Image (cartoon, rainbow, N blue to C red):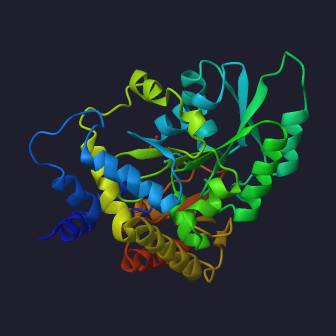
Amino acid sequence: MDALEQTSAARTDYNQFASDNYAGICPQAWQAMQSANTGFVSSYGDDPWTERACQQLRQVFETDCQVFFVFNGTAANSLALASLCRSYHSVICHELAHVETDECGAPEFFSNGTKILHVPGENGKFDLAEVERAITRRSDIHYPRPRVLSLTQATEVGTVYTPDEIRAASALARQYGLRVQMDGARFANAVASLNVHPADITWRVGVDVLCLGGAKNGMAVGEAVLFFNRELAEEFDYRCKQAGQLASKMRFISAPWIGMLEEGTWLKNARHANDCAELLERNLVGIAGVRVMYPRQANSVFIELPEKVAAGLRAAGWHFYSFIGSGGARFMCSWQTTSEDVQQLTAAIRSAVAGC
Ligand SMILES: *Cc1c(COP(=O)(O)O)cnc(C)c1O
C-alpha cells in the first residue's frame, strides 16, 4: 500500500467535514519528510532542507523575504503581531478573526498586552469604513494606539479578499502608519480560488508579514512566517526561541515544505479542496430548507440548518462544526476529501431534511 492508499483506507469509517486539520499528511509532504531522515544533520535550522525550503518560498513569492518556521498558526500569528507592535499598541481585525476568537489571547500574551480591536463587516471581511473609524476614533493617550491591520485570507467564513480589496486596506493602513499582517492559515485556498500569483495578494498589495499555513494544506505540522519587509524581522529568531517555537530538528518541519512547493502540490491540494466545496455547494442549493450563508469562495460551505436536521445528521455519524451563530453549520473540505465523500454527505443532508 502506498502512503495515499493508507491514509484513505484509514479514513473511510469516519464521516467528517469538521475541519481540514482532520485530514492526514499528504504523500508529498510525508515523502519529503522521510527523505530528510538521513543520518546526522546540524540542528536549529542550519541544514540544507531548511535553506532549500526558504529559497523555494522566495521563488514562489518572487521576492527575497525573510522566512521562519514555527509549529502552528497561533504561534505564527501571535509572534508576527508581537513583532509589529509594542505593548501599548493595538491590532485591528474582523470580529470573527482567528486572532480574536480562537487563539486564547495568545497575541496579547506574546506582545505583553497589545490589545485586539475588532470591527464588523459582511461575509467575514472587515468594512474599511469601520476600520478607519477604529483607527481615528481616538488619538489620546488613554486609547491603545492602532499599529497593525490584520486580515485573514481566506477568511474564517470561507470567503476571499480580492487583490483590490487588499490593496485598498493596505493603503488605508499606510495612511495612518499601520502595518499589515495576513493570517494565511488557508492562504493556498485563496490563491487557488483567485487564480493569482501569491505575490499579487501579498507584498505587491502592501502586506508586510504573511503567516502561511501548512497543516491544513496537507502537512503534519508547521507554518511559515514570511517577512516581506525584512526590517520587521529583526530579532524574530529570538522571539521564536523564547516562545518555544524553534524546532531543534528543524529539517523535519522544513523538508515537507519542499515537498509541498515543488511541482505545485500546495496549490493542487488547495484547488482540490476548493473544488470539493464547490461541488457540495452546488448539491446543497437544490435542497429545500437549506440556505448557504456566505459566498463559497474557498474550501468551506456554511449552511443554515434547522436544529433538528443538524441533530439528525450528527446522529447519523457526521462530524461538523456549528459555532457561527445559531443553526449555522460549517462543512470544510481538505486535500483528502473525495467527491464520493461529498455525495455521501449530500445524501445524508437530504435524508436528514426529509426526516424532519
Ligand atoms: C487553523 C487556523 C489558524 C491556526 O491554528 P492553529 O491551531 O494554531 O494551527 C490560524 N488562523 C485561522 C484562520 C485558522 O483557521
Figure quadrant of the N terminus: bottom left
Query: At 27% from the left edge and 49% from the top edge, which residue is drawn?
Result: 49
Check the image and name the residue furthest to the left. Answer: 39
Residue 19 shows up from this direction: no
Residue 67 falls in which quadrant of the image? top left
Give the left or right position of residue 118, taking residue 15 as reference: right
Query: At 53% from the left edge and 70% from the top edge, which residue is drawn?
Result: 192
Query: At 88% from the left edge and 48% from the top edge, which residue is drawn?
Result: 129
In front here: 221 or 70?
Answer: 70
Image coords of residue 191 (percent x, y): 56, 66
Residue 295 falls in which quadrant of the image? bottom right
Figure quadrant of the C terminus: bottom right
Check the image and name the residue furthest to the front. Answer: 64
Check the image and name the residue furthest to the top. Answer: 141
Query: At 25% from the left edge and 47% from the top edge, which residue is drawn?
Result: 48
Residue 289 shows up from this direction: yes
Image coords of residue 211 (percent x, y): 52, 46
In front here: 350 or 246?
Answer: 246
In front here: 93 or 345?
Answer: 93
Image coords of residue 107 (percent x, y): 58, 30
Image coords of residue 190 (percent x, y): 57, 64
In front here: 282 or 227?
Answer: 227
